[in-house]
Amino acid sequence: MVDKQQTYEEAVQRLEQIAAELEKGELGLAEQLAFYEEGMALAKRCQAELEQVEERLRRLTEDGQEVSLDDR
């Protein structure tokens, strides 16, 4: 189950754990489905959080121009 109190980093770490478990191929069908559902919920939450951060960054730029995060 997705913990809404998790940080983004904790959610990504949990996604990595889920992927590792699924890649082992040792889980039963019901367990695989449960991990898949949890992983999809986490991925959706992480994507939404990234989109919120991107929007905040856009608002913080003085001239409204998008700034590449690679330009440091």
Image: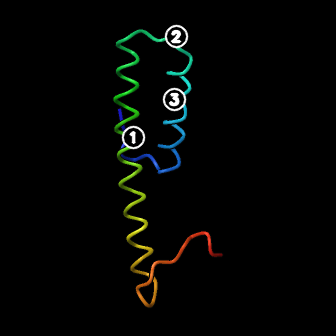
Q: Amino acid at mark 2?
A: Glu
Residue found at x 50% / y 21%:
22
Q: Amino acid at mark 3?
A: Ala
* SS type, badge 3: helix
* SS type, badge 1: helix
Is tag 2's residue or tag 1's residue first in the polypeptide sequence? 2
* SS type, badge 2: loop
Is tag 1's residue or tag 3's residue first in the polypeptide sequence? 3
Say whether marks 3 and 2 touch (CB < 8 Å): no
Say whether marks 1 and 3 touch (CB < 8 Å): no
Residue 35 in which image quadrant: top left
- Label 2 crowd (10 A; few <14 / some 14-19 / many >=20): few
- Label 1 crowd (10 A; few <14 / some 14-19 / many >=20): many
Give the CA distance from mark 1 to mark 3.
12 Å
- Farthest-out residue, bottom: 63
Asked if residue 66 lies left or right of residue 40, the reply is right
The C terminus, quarter of image:
bottom right
What label sits on residue 24 in the rendered view? none
The residue where tag 2 is placed is 26
Q: Residue 58, percent across and down?
A: 42, 77
In depth, the one of 6 and 64 nearer the eye is 64
Figure disc tally = 3
Q: Residue 60, percent across and down?
A: 44, 81
Q: Residue 3, percent across and down?
A: 38, 40
The residue where tag 1 is placed is 42
Residue found at x 41% / y 49%:
46
Q: Is residue 57 above or below residue 51?
A: below
Q: Amino acid at mark 1?
A: Leu
The N terminus, quarter of image:
top left
The residue where tag 3 is placed is 19
Say whether marks 2 and 1 touch (CB < 8 Å): no
